[in-house]
Image (cartoon, helix red, strand yellow):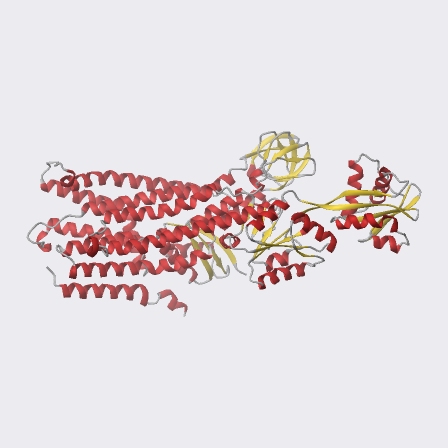
Amino acid sequence: MIDKVIVTLLGALVIGFIVWYFFMVPDKRKRERE
Amino acid sequence: MEEKIEIGVAGMTCASCVRRVENFVAQSEGVTTASVNLATESASITYDPKLVDYEKLKAIVAESGYKPYDVFGEDSGAEIQRREAEYKASLRKFVTSALMTVPIMTISMQDKLGFTLKLGEWPEKISLFLLTSIVLFWMGSGFMTGAVKAFKARSADMNTLIAVGTLTAYSYSTVSLFAPRLIAVGGGEPPLYFETSAMIVTLILMGKYLEARAKGKATDAISKLMNLAPKTAKVIRDGSEMEVEVKSVQVGDLVIVRPGESIPVDGEVTEGVSAVDEAMMTGESIPVDKKTGDRVIGGTINRTGSFTFRATQVGSATTLSKIVRLVREAQGSKAPAQKLADLIASYFVPVVMIIAVITFVVWYDFGPEPAFTLALVNFVAVMIIACPCALGLATPTAIMVGAAKGAESGALIKNGEALEKSAGITAIILDKTGTITTGEPEVASVFTTDGVTEKDLISTAATAEKRSEHPLGEAMVRYAAEKGLLIPDPDDFASATGSGVTATVKGAKVFVGSEKYMKENGLDTSLVKDESDRIAGNGMTPLFIARDSEVIGVMGVSDKVKDGAKEAVGRFKDMGLEVAMVTGDHPATAKAIAREVGIERVVSGARPEEKAEEARRLQAEGKVVAMVGDGINDAPALAAADIGFAIGAGTDIAIESSDITLMTGNLNGVVTAIRLGKATLRVIKQNLFWAFAYNTLLIPVAAGILYPIWGVTLNPMLAALAMAFSSVTVVSNSLRLKSFSGAAR
């Protein structure tokens, strides 16, 4: 069994990635326009 | 100069896709605005033709990850074929997938169903693996490629959820099958979830198929309209009759129509009489008589006689083409209610993924054994249950069916906004002439002084007015003709604009006109004073007739109230609307007409801008105001009101200044349009409610919120079933509008 702490950390990492990838990084095209 | 164009966008699956295409196209160079509609699968784009052209725009759409196709032009047969092909493909995929899933389910469920196939453990497991692989990567390939495309564009949509959900179950099962030691669960063999993946794909394909079928039903209004015009026409060329394709009919061609045939293009009757059924254009069920000089509309059906007409509008200029274009535009437009839904949908999928990850972690950390398996199953359930497709379809499908239904009952709705707005009006302003009344004055009362016969009076007046071009004069001439009286030419004739005419009839000098005109000519009207007051009090215009310096009578000319106007006003009141009438007419006449139809609030002697003022006054009282007028002198008021109805536009579509154009002159058309607007808004609200309620209720259930209380979790297969049915429910609910029966006659 994988350690619960590791699973939790992995989960947090995935969530972080989702937030960063879909919400935080401004659209490349938008940047070009600015 | 900006231009507007419509481009078809194929391959969109949900509201997230709509956002993606919209943002991508709108941010491209040369594009001002982009509005994408999921139900019609098209993008309406305003652009600067100096910077981009049609081909470039298509390339931009393709770059956003979807397939562009042509929708403009009159022949949308290609579009229908494309939809047909899509529909058949979705059926084929679903059936194949279902056929594969049956053995998968049989093998997986044999213990639960209480029988054994006795194929041996390994052959069974390997078949599960192979069959599921086919279902997932062949039948479900669209979901996989869609998810990859979305990911590359930094967005997530329904495909992402399905792909991640099914692939998770599939990967877990594959590892369990080939390397069980990696997932050691209390010494026993880890379970397989192949059937879950396969079942999810099959059920969602079923949902897609049902949705395509329902969407087809919603769009068939357009094909029905287009099929109204016959494919061929009989024209006279070089002196002989020949049958040609409708496309090749030219303006000026003489076209022959026999009983029972459809009229191919718009035109003017040159020979023959008949009755024409124009119900499909105007919603009016009684056939209209046509004689030489009358206009006929392409797509209507000739009932009784044969006639010849000269084509005046052909090709894309015909009324039918205009209607098709309008309906298509309205169907593709976005209702304000959709904007919020679209915004939510764009954040929805990433948020769902976050919830799914949290679900997994919580189940793994705090859940019962086998923790990993249960965490995984619930993760998949959350991913699958939360599809925003129902959200994306909620409004556009309702608008689509509503706009088509409007056209069917003679109300051309400009856009979804107009339809939504018409549901919320609280006050209605009606123009008098041409809206409440026919706009065609008629002689309704004749009074003579002693010693003068009615016949004498009518014939004298008509003769004097024979050369007059004033509507009141024309009414007198028509009246005399109806009575069968001879109307000789007057010896001389002079008219004073707006007040009366002077002519010599049978050697005597005759004056016909208003009271003011009589006085100007030194004539005494006291003999007919009582009668003229009575006429004005009844909403008619009194016209005095004098011969040889003596008034010999007075005639009352009335602009008759239209059939159904009174009923319509009553219906407006029943709806709780404040009804007002505006007119440029004399106060006494206006009041009498208002009384006849039951309106209390009257503004008379109003110029066009004063009509608009009344609209603003009602708005200041906090009312949402609708204005009904004939669209010409009422243009300022139509524009000032929250929603403008152009009435009786008949064949000339004065759509520019109005939001809703009624094909007939009947005021009850407004009642129909308002009822339709209300019905559509009700369906939109239901759809949005169910789409939201479904997601907000079932996501926590899928996450396992009920587990601590009742020990209930949601099987991912049930989640897939629920998801498939959520969009089907929304589309079917919109289709209910097809049976809208609130048309008022």
Residue B608 spot, x, y in % from top left: 67, 58
Residue sitting farthest toward the left: B187
B223 or B195: nearer the viewer: B195
Figure check: B547 above or below B19: above
Residue B742 spot, x, y in % from top left: 52, 43
B392 or B246: nearer the viewer: B392
Q: Is residue B637 left or right of residue B719?
A: right
Please state, as top left, top right, bottom left or bottom right, where the C terminus of chain B lies in the image: top right
Q: In which quarter of the view is residue A8 placed?
A: bottom left
Viewer can see residue B150: yes
Residue B281 spot, x, y in % from top left: 57, 41
Figure check: B235 above or below B571: above
Q: Is residue B324 left or right of residue B703?
A: right
Residue B252 spot, x, y in % from top left: 65, 40
B335 or B300: nearer the viewer: B335
Please state, as top left, top right, bottom left or bottom right, where the N terminus of chain B lies in the image: bottom right
Q: Is residue B467 left or right of residue B625?
A: right
| Residue depicted at 9% across the width and 51% down the height | B180
Viewer can see residue B433: no
How many numbered dots are placed on residues in this image?
Answer: 0
Q: In which quarter of the view is residue B27 placed?
A: bottom left
